Amino acid sequence: MPLKSELHSPVAATPKRARLAAVPRAAGEREDATVARLIYERVRLGIMSALAVRGEVTFTELKALFDVSDGNLSAHARKLEEAKYLISSKSFEARRPKTAYRITPKGRQALNRYLDHVEAVIKATRR
């Protein structure tokens, strides 16, 4: 017969918990939480993904794609540029300023590392 304290214990009432699977890291790779945190935010991940697919995307295109304010998009792009994940070029087109962004090799590597980690989490979850 269970002890009185076990009768009211939430642990005693729940079925045996499944063991969590470890998410493997790439060989020799040290996960840098700052890098992951920099990319995983919705707008930044979107910027990086769009650049990885299209090569070059303008500020106006990104703004329409993510439905964000100028200031919000500018702040996210600046963070990625400071991390050297993207580069920007500024020009004028029909007397209007035009900012275009391109992903850097370092940015592509960081994005791929983040995506590899997410894929490993998904695989571990589906086991």
Image (spheres, grey):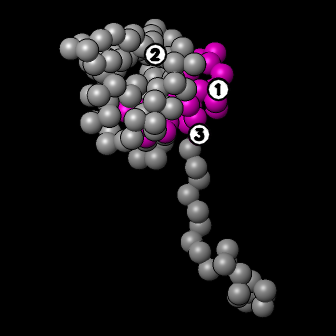
| Image quadrant where residue 66 sits | top left
Instruction: Report the residue at 71% width, 87% height from top.
Output: 8
Residue 98 drawn in magenta? no
Label 1: state its secondary structure.
Answer: loop
Residue at 40% in and 35% down:
70
Measuring from the top left, give residue 47's x and y in whole percent: 38, 28
Q: Earlier in the sequence, mark 3 or mark 1?
A: 3
Q: Range of the magenta residues?
A: 22-46
Identify the image quadrant of residue 13: bottom right
Residue 35: in magenta span:
yes
> In the figure, 22 relative to 117: above or below?
below
Q: Is residue 78 left or right of residue 29?
A: left
Residue 85, compared with residue 19, is above or below; it is above
Disc 2 target residue: 86
Q: Identify the amino acid type marked 1.
A: Asp
Kind of element beneath mark 3: loop
The first of marks 3 and 2 along the sequence is: 3
**Three-letter amino acid code at the position of disc 2:** Leu
Identify the residue under disc 1: 32
Amino acid type, mark 3 = Ala
Residue bearing mark 3 = 22
Residue 108 in sight: yes
- Disc 1 packing (10 Å; few <14; some 14–19; many ≥20): few
Q: Nearer the viewer, residue 89 or 106?
A: 89
Q: How far apart, in angstroms, are the residues tagged by discs 3 and 2?
A: 32 Å
Up the image or down, 21 lies above or below 83; here it is below
Q: In the image shown, does 91 or 76 lie closer to the viewer?
A: 91
| Of 65 and 59, the residue lying toward us | 59
